[in-house]
Amino acid sequence: MIKDIIDKKRLGLSLSYEELSSIFNGYMKGEVEDYQMSSLLMAICINGMGEDEIFDLTEIFIQSGDTLDFSRIPGIKVDKHSTGGIGDKTTLVIVPIVASLGVPVIKMSGRGLGYTGGTIDKLESISGFRTDLTNEEIIDSVSKVGAVITGQTANLVPLDKMIYALRDVTATVSSIALIAVSIMSKKLAAGADKILLDVKYGKGALVSTKEEAEELALLMQKIGKKYQHEVRYVLSNMDHPLGCYVGNSLEVQEAIETLKGNVAGRFYELCIELSSHMVSMSKGIDYEEAVSLVEEVIKNGRAYHKFEEIVCNQKGDLAHIQVSPHIHPVYSEREGIIKDIDALKIGKLSLSLGAGRCEKNDVIDYGVGIVLHKMVGESVHKGDLLMDLYFNHDNFEVDQSIFKIE
């Protein structure tokens, strides 16, 4: 039976709900072997899935665990998901911005596996910050301060956790169908009324081209429509790192400076765009009107004050954000204009410093990372400071080709 299902997909044929349920739920129960599921995932990666198959598999994923109900919290709740990238700390900025405008935000985030930490890792670099809230604590927190950022509950789409772990080691992460099912099953199970997607493309992203990113975004939008959820998306480039700081504690510091209005550039602009869409969706107002509201709460300090409230409510202490005292400066070896900063190479460097995980159970060093002092388009002279590396061990190598200078 299992062999027949795998063979059917190998031939590029569509699988029924019953066939998908049999093999995926069978895998979760331990009745289907890793090598069998790996074969099916590779067949899906090569041949793709039809819309009905994608809708069916999304439902199978959702039904594999708990679905959360936050209808007790008044207001339209908008969830945001980013497909991730080097230096992406947008959640730390947009959640307090949106909450300071009276929009309830329940943000469930994950840990990082790969080049940099996830949102939860970044927050746990703040001494004492709790990310293991129960459903009742989530509701209490949103009622009290208007927002919460917490880890996913253990039984939220457990099938996705198992399948993703297998995809990660079988070269099937890049399947657009499987990416869409993974993201949307978690978002739909997490109890939001509306969903905003930040879909990234480029060297530091899951998909490499803008066309692939739009294909993924449109597919996730269709899944949302199937479940009667409004889904908007923003496409953002990840060829270059997002912001100037990469590494958990360092990214918290950059988020704080952004909320205080002290940071300009691409990262700030993306935070404004994402926050404005969330406010527009929740309040039912024009995007342009939402932009004005978002910019105002940054200028008047309400956004940063809300961040302080969220951190305090979750037992964090902003006076204790540890950054390594050991700094290795990297200087330019030539003169010219910076044409490119390779996000993927920055990510690999941050991983070698200890800011990310190679394996699920690796321990992250919160205090290490990279601060960029020059950005794409800037001119440099030989000897100019390009970046500072914050480290606690010296087992790393600096690749000057990170910066393309012409």
Image (cartoon, rainbow, N blue to C red):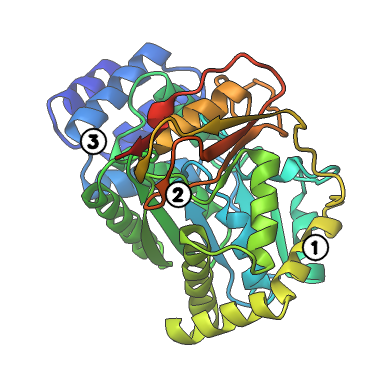
Which type of secondary structure does the marked residue at label 1 adopt?
helix
> In this rendering, would 12 be left or right of 147?
left
Separation (CA) of disc 3 from disc 2: 48 Å
Residue type, mark 3 in image:
Leu
Quarter occupied by the C terminus: top left
Residue type, mark 1 in image:
Glu
Q: Which residue is mark 1?
A: 308
Residue type, mark 2 in image:
Met
Q: In this view of the protein, can residue 101 be seen by the observer?
A: no
Residue in view at x 54 percent, y 52 percent? 189
Q: Which residue is mark 2?
A: 375
Residue in view at x 39 percent, y 39 percent? 204
Residue in view at x 54 percent, y 61 percent? 79
Quarter occupied by the N terminus: top left
Q: Which residue is mark 3?
A: 15
Separation (CA) of disc 2 from disc 1: 30 Å
In-front residue for pair 54/392: 392
